Amino acid sequence: MSTLNLPLIGFQNSFITTVIAEIRESFRAKWFFLYTLIFGGAIVMLLALGITESQVLGFTGLSRLLITYIQLCVAILPIFILITTVRTVVGDRESNVLEYILSLPISLGAYYWGKLTARFIIVFIPVLLALSGAVVWGAVKNLSIPWSIVGYYSLMLASLAWAFLGTGMFISTLVRKQEWALGLAFLVWLTLLLFIDVILIGVLLQNQIMEEVIIGIALLNPLQVFRTGAILLFDPELSLLGPASYVILDNMGYTGFLFYSILYPLGLGWAFSWLGYKIFQTGDLV
Amino acid sequence: MVYKKYMIKLSKINKTFAQHQVLDDLELELKIGDRIALIGQNGAGKTTLIRTLLGQYVAEGQLSMFGLNPRQQRVEVLQKIGFVPQHSPPIQMSVGELVDFSASLSLNPMKEEVHALAGKLEFDIEAQAGKPFFKLSGGMKQKLLIALALSKRPEFLIMDEPAANLDPAGRKAFFDELSLLPQKTTMLLSSHRVDELLPFINRIIEMDCGRIVHDKQFAGEIKAGKSLACKIQITAEDEAISKIFDSWKFTNGSNPGLYSGKLAEVDLMRFFNEIAQFSNLIKEIKMEAE
């Protein structure tokens, strides 16, 4: 083995060790049980309520279930990820766990990216299991299973989760107090939530800004991008969105927007997590 | 690895928190085999110095650990360091997981040694393996962290109040283990009870306001119960310091400003603490074991 490979092997070993440790810790954490209960329970509840047999705007069966699930994910997934992730670094710092863990020969990259990767696995698994459960239930009930929609939808959820994990880690390295981290997480979430509809519609109504600009701002919001992308899966004309659909589809097209709705949140997550890493790497660690 | 002269060298180290200077132009050189008691009042800068040595703080100045930079080559540096913090952190991992985690990061195979060392400190890892670390008692946490630090066979051991939470039997076992460490192991032990460290140290460093105000190297190991012949040269006569010398039965000989006396080694720290406030008057301190 050449000596050039040693640091990389050291990194891989530390990275895997951190991922395993973080996953084990998360499995024991109360937030994880609550999180799994909510996302798994939501599907069970929707199935129990017979939502697959109802019909709204022409959607029925599993498509109807997935549309409702989207609304739940938009509302709950980002804030859940944010409030559990923003405490990752700052929480360990405040409790002196970081002082001890970082006195061990572990590279900062292995620690940071290991934590982030483990969080992604932990956050995404319950959602994926819930979706798989819905598919299995659909198969048992002989419902038609929209495989491409389930596939795209899973990718979009993964991308959305990554966007908020990256944002959460960025906030976690940026502030020195958990209270600040939580406050900032809520502020980010509320701002993004408001920019989905409320503020934008208000601005549109007052006709102060060009429609294209407002839609452009909306498409910088990962929540709105996820929501629009998810709607596009079921409603290729985006008729639910009204006139905004013309701007979106004329500029990006159906396939273009589907790619955008997966790649943009993913890129945003990478950008924030990289910024967070740079702050972590270059500042005081404890 | 052979270091030119000093294993660790800090030059003009400055660290500021919110405009408060915590380390002030700090200069420090440690050689292989230095066994240091780091003393000083709360806020003197001891923990900041330790965290700087561990590469956890970004500080101005030059810092070389084993010829490496602890920020840029942290893994290589930390492979050689064993650390026990002042307050055991509330780590969520179970005892077994923490042992596995530490062992998987160490280049030296250490798992069997951790079990053996913890056993000597009267902590049974096997019996507690599934218990979360944060649910252990303060003493048990400390014993495990000490076992983890020592089992790495570190070149440099940093311990911040290592025996603070230990019961008498645990303290005895801990000090027995310290005495068994190879002579080349460099130690930095921060403690408020220096008297019990005296058998293991050959250097005392006192910090105040982010600076090293006293740095005394002893020729050999200090043995508890022995005394030191002490000569202190001051730059100007002062009534307050003269009273302190009188209370310690020091005499002022023919040489102006030169005080001589004997100090029991267990009283050394108490004596240093009393004269520390007059450090600007003290020109030279000479000590010899009798």
Image: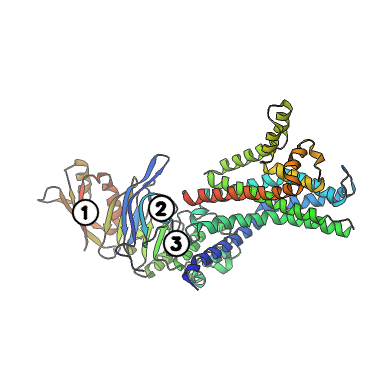
Q: Secondary structure at mark 3?
A: helix
Query: What number is the disc on residue A243?
Result: none
* Residue A214 found in image quarter: top right
N-terminal-most mark, 2 or 3: 2
* Residue B82 found in image quarter: bottom left
Q: Estimate how packed mark 3 is, as few (under 14), some (14 to 19) or many (20 or more) residues with alpha carbons within 10 Å.
A: many
Whole-number angstrom distance, CA of label 2 to CA of label 1: 29 Å
Check whether the beta carbons of the residues at disc 3 and disc 1 lie within 8 A of each other: no
Q: Position of residue A197 (x, y in %)?
A: 73, 35
Name the subunit of mark 1: B
B98 or B57, which lies in front?
B57
Q: Which residue is mark 2?
A: B52
- The color scheme shown is rainbow
Q: Are marks 2 and 3 on the same chain?
A: yes
Q: Position of residue A145 (x, y in %)?
A: 85, 56
Task: Mark yes or no: residue A196 visible.
Answer: yes
Marks 2 and 1: which is nearer the front?
A: 2
Q: Estimate how packed mark 2 is, as few (under 14), some (14 to 19) or many (20 or more) residues with alpha carbons within 10 Å.
A: many
Q: Secondary structure at mark 2?
A: helix
Using residue A26 as the reference point, say whether residue A99 is left or right of it.
left
Q: Which residue is mark 1?
A: B285
A261 or B87, which lies in front?
A261
Q: Position of residue B53 (x, y in %)?
A: 40, 55
Q: How many marks?
A: 3
Q: Position of residue A282 (x, y in %)?
A: 47, 50
Query: What number is the disc on residue B78?
Result: 3
Residue A226 vs A18, above or below: the answer is above
What amino acid is at disc 2?
A: Thr
